[in-house]
């Protein structure tokens, strides 16, 4: 847990929220919650310029909805991270636009950042209506992680341009484009 906390605090940022359910989990694994929080506090003390705040799930969701700009990076146990990611996806426009990355000391995996909604919905795939934006933005995150910022910027700019123009959007974004039409439009906009 300390290694994960060090990684998070070493990222450039002003805010760090550590979300937990400590008061509710007292009877179920309190030692794990205490270890989790102690690790985060220990690492936070080494980064005094970064605002560190412990917050429980209920309040975290309120903060996320009412003041999303304060929620830069959050360190959460897995289950709560899924709940928060799905809430953030709803705020951002749906699971189809939410990129995600899971980074460790030696490995990283990039994927759609939220799992509610159309993920795994075969009907959406068969109709070619799945929104590819989250995966395209996740690959952008991967390019940045691999130290290819110019390629990442070009892809991200193309995705943002196509979505903001509104000509090519999948159904979840208020359009009627197919997955392939949106992908081709992004490819055509990469400069």
Image (cartoon, grey):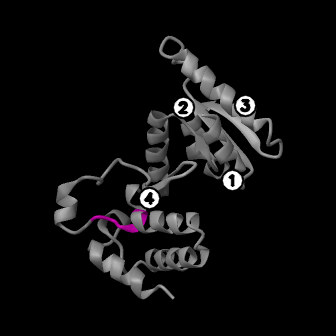
- Nearest the viewer among 14 and 108 is 108
Give above or below for 110 relative to 151. Answer: above
SS at badge 3: helix
Earlier residue among tags 2 and 4: 2
Q: Residue at x 46, y 75 (%)?
A: 159
The mark lying in front, picked from 2 and 4, is 2
The stretch in magenta equals 130-134
Q: Is label 2 in contact with label 4 (beta carbons under 8 Å)?
A: no
Q: Mark 3 = which residue?
A: 41
Q: Mark 1 = which residue?
A: 11
Q: Is label 3 in contact with label 4 (beta carbons under 8 Å)?
A: no
Q: Is label 3 in contact with label 1 (beta carbons under 8 Å)?
A: no
Tell me how far mark 2 sits from mark 4, CA to CA: 21 Å
Quadrant where the N terminus sits is top right
Query: Can you give x and y, in whole percent of width and height, for residue 135 in the image?
Result: 40, 64
Q: Is residue 177 visible?
A: no
Residue 131, magenta (yes or no)? yes
Tell me how far mark 2 sits from mark 3, CA to CA: 18 Å
Prevailing secondary structure of the magenta residues: loop
- Residue 57 tag number: 2
Query: Dot 1: within a 10 Å radius of its alpha carbon, few (fewer than 14), some, or many (20 or more) residues?
Result: few
Query: Dot 2: within a 10 Å radius of its alpha carbon, few (fewer than 14), some, or many (20 or more) residues?
Result: many
Q: Mark 4 = which residue?
A: 93
The mark lying in front, picked from 1 and 4, is 1
Q: In screen coordinates, is 111 left or right of 171? A: right
SS at badge 1: loop
Query: Dot 3: within a 10 Å radius of its alpha carbon, few (fewer than 14), some, or many (20 or more) residues?
Result: some
Q: Residue at x 79, y 43 (%)?
A: 47
Q: Residue at x 32, y 69 (%)?
A: 170
């Amino acid at each position: 847990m300390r290694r994960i906390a060090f990684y998070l605090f070493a990222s450039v940022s002003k805010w760090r929220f550590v979300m937990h359910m400590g008061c509710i989990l007292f009877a179920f694994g309190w030692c794990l919650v205490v270890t989790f929080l102690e690790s985060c506090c220990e690492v936070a003390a080494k980064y005094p310029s970064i605002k560190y705040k412990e917050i429980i799930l209920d309040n975290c969701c309120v903060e996320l909805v009412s003041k999303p700009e304060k929620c830069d990076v959050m360190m959460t146990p897995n289950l709560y991270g899924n709940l928060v990611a799905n809430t953030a996806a709803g705020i951002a426009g749906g699971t189809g636009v939410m990129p995600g990355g899971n980074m460790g000391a030696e490995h990283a995996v990039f994927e759609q950042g939220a799992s509610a909604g159309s993920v795994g919905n075969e009907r959406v795939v068969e109709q070619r209506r799945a929104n590819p934006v989250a995966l395209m933005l996740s690959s952008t995150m991967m390019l940045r992680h691999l130290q290819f910022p110019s390629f990442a910027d070009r892809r991200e700019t193309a995705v943002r341009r196509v979505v903001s123009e509104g000509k090519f959007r999948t159904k979840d974004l208020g359009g009627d484009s197919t997955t392939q039409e949106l992908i081709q439009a992004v490819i055509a906009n990469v400069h």
